[in-house]
Amino acid sequence: MSTHRSWAEPWKVKMVEHLRMTTRAQRESAIREAGYNTFLLPSRLVYIDLLTDSGTSAMSDRQWAGLMLGDEAYAGSENYYHLEDAVREHYGFREVIPTHQGRGAEHLLSRVAIHPGQCVPGNMYFTTTKAHQELAGGRFVDVIIDEAHDADSSHPFKGDIDLEKLQTLIDRVGAAGIAYVCVGATVNMAGGQPISLGNLRAVRALCARHGIRIFLDATRAVENAYFIKTREPGHADRTLAQILRAMCECADGCTMSAKKDSLVNIGGFLALNDAALAEEARNLMVLYEGLQTYGGLAGRDMEALAIGIAESVDFDHMHARIGQVEYLGRKLLEAGVPITRPIGGHGVFLDAARFLPRLPRDQFPAQALAAALYVDSGVRSMERGGVSAGRDQKTGENLFPRLELVRLTIPRRVYTQAHMDVTAESVIALHRNRDRIRGLKFTHEPRHLRFFQARFDPVEGDCVLVD
Ligand code: F0G
């Protein structure tokens, strides 16, 4: 008898959403009209949408039922108290400030916790997080371990902070020169890579010695907890809920984009322990988000979020979620496609620099590969490389981070293994025909977060994928 046992999702499908199939000619014209930017494609022309795992999850029947229990009172909505309870129970922070999504929380935190000129060290950057830190006058400093910048390193916790880098920064600017340490769990831009609990605790100890606060970007912290349970010695017998609490105990608060781990289509929160800091954040909140008991969310959204938080820490759910990402990643690895290793939590990241070694970085290989993938099969992915990194604030030069990636991000509870097969076959076919992919040049470059709205043309001809 075979000892191998497959996992399967701990749910079944109750309702389906039809997808539109397109022809290659339709996709060629759509991507041209979108300026070769997958963000600018209308979703009705996308077959399998792996642009992001953000707000794209399928809610459960319980969450949908929760929508009917929305208490749309302007003040003191019942659903706010459910949300507050869920955050206190699972994340452990006392003060709960709902926001319309993650960047709303980042805005509030950056404004109340950063003095202009201070540094904000972090384990790699995330686009909106760094942008808000900079708008508040802060300066992001990368203190992640070097392995995180090497797509081929198989370090199990590439999200770890390099304690020496952090100590060197503290020695150089002093504790007063540091607003707080911003810890991402998992690290999106490194490929959905986790931070270990051991490292997080060591960062906490180091910061405590210097009186420096730590704020967690808890957007995918439950996925991170899964990796701690399955990879870090000593945690196999603990529940995801216990590990999540242990992670949060290392921090003074967190920002949260609930559109990921928490299985809702919109929502976020800022959670803090310091009541005085929370008071400052609430003062801004009423200006930028909404009243303190809804923060830009409808009552029903807060109810779905409270339920989603509890569902997110279920091991079988997370095992199937990360198992599906691994399934796609393994197929690509077996076919020799260069991807970031280890396979991450929320997606598979194609290493576009190695996929298209002949394209120079200033022809944006990852942007070109994402456009070509769409033309080939209608699969929508996202660039995470030079275009996302933007320009140096001082010199105005393009930043070319070492990682030049295309992200195939898997929404939670949405696609089947067959969708993963179709995706893998398209990527593998493109890899075999990689010499047919053309580089891109800017035709329009926005000032902030340029990747969202930038437009391009192929450097030669009028096709990103030559037939
Ligand atoms: N932090 C991380 C690690 C994120 O991945 C995101 C969003 C945010 C903060 C901001 O949250 O979108 O709710 O305002 N990431 C999305 C993505 C956009 O596609 O990776 P938001």
Image: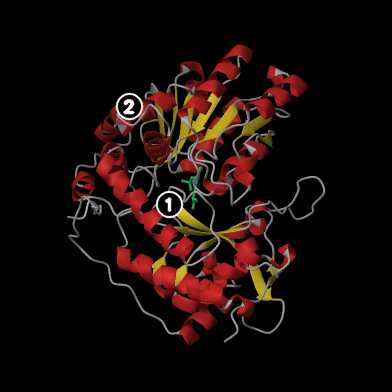
**Residue at the spot of label 2:** 242
Which residue is nearer to you in this view: 291 or 163?
163
Q: Amino acid at mark 2?
A: Gln
| Whether residue 56 can be seen here | no
- Disc count in the image? 2
Residue for point 54% across, 31% down: 109
| Most foreground residue, 251 or 329 | 329
Left/right of residue 124 with respect to residue 14 in the rendered view: right
- Among numbered discs 2 and 1, the one appearing first in the sequence: 1
Q: Residue 73, relative to residue 376: is it above or below?
A: above
Q: Residues within 10 Å of mark 1 (few under 14, many from 20)?
A: many
Evaluate if marks 2 and 1 touch, with contact meaning CB atoms under 8 Å apart.
no
- The quadrant in which residue 18 appears is bottom left
The residue lying furthest to the front in this view is: 1
Around disc 2, counting alpha carbons within 10 Å, would you say few (fewer than 14), some (14 to 19), or many (20 or more)?
Answer: some
What residue is shown at x 43% (from left), y 26% (from top)? 248
Q: Position of residue 319 (x, y in %)?
A: 31, 46
Tell me where residue 227 appears, x and y as whole percent: 41, 39
Q: Residue furthest right?
A: 395
The numbered disc on residue 54 is 1
Real-space Cα separation, disc 2 to disc 1, in angstroms: 25 Å
Give the number of the mark in front: 2 or 1.
2
In this view, 385 is above or below 189? below
